[in-house]
Image: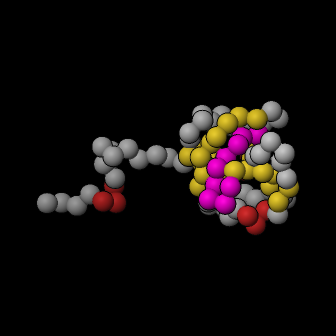
Amino acid sequence: MSKEFKVGDRVRLIALPRYVKTAEPMPMLRPPDVVRIGEEGVILDRRPGGFWGVRFSKGAFLMDSQYIEAVESHHPGDPHPSSSSPE
């Protein structure tokens, strides 16, 4: 079962594939060490075959849904439990 994301969603890499493919018109295979587990990126688009274009710090890559998870976003108005202190 494929996870669903929206363009602009922040995601986190939860596992490394055997290789990564660049999200360019002429995709190239790269070794998996160009991204790190835990690295966060932004969904650029949806690709055929259950792949997502994701922008990471070292470029845009095609990621299968099984390797990424949504990152919980904190809105500026939301209280953050670790930052609350009694006054």
Q: Which residue is painted at 76% across and 59% down in the image?
A: 16
Which quadrant of the figure contains the C terminus? bottom left
Q: Is residue 52 magenta?
A: yes
Relative vertical location of residue 63 with respect to residue 1 in this rendering, above or below:
below
* In the image: residue 76, left or right of residue 51: left
In this view, the residue farthest toward the left is 87
Q: Provide the residue span drawn in magenta.
A: 51-59
Relative vertical location of residue 30 with respect to residue 75 in this rendering, above or below:
below
The image position of residue 34, as x and y in percent, is 73, 64
Q: Quadrant of residue 45?
A: top right
User: How many numbered dots are placed on residues in this image?
Assistant: 0
* In the image: residue 73, left or right of residue 86: right
Q: Which residue is painted at 46% across and 46% down in the image?
A: 73
The image position of residue 64, as x and y in percent, is 76, 44
Q: Which residue is painted at 76% across and 35% down in the image?
A: 47
Answer yes or no: is residue 80 visible: yes
Answer yes or no: is residue 65 visible: no
In this view, the residue farthest toward the front is 25
* In the image: residue 50, left or right of residue 77: right
Relative vertical location of residue 44 with respect to residue 22 in this rendering, above or below:
above
Which quadrant of the figure contains the N terminus? top right
The image position of residue 79, as x and y in percent, is 30, 48
Q: Name the foreground residue: 1 vs 39.
A: 39
Q: Is residue 55 magenta?
A: yes
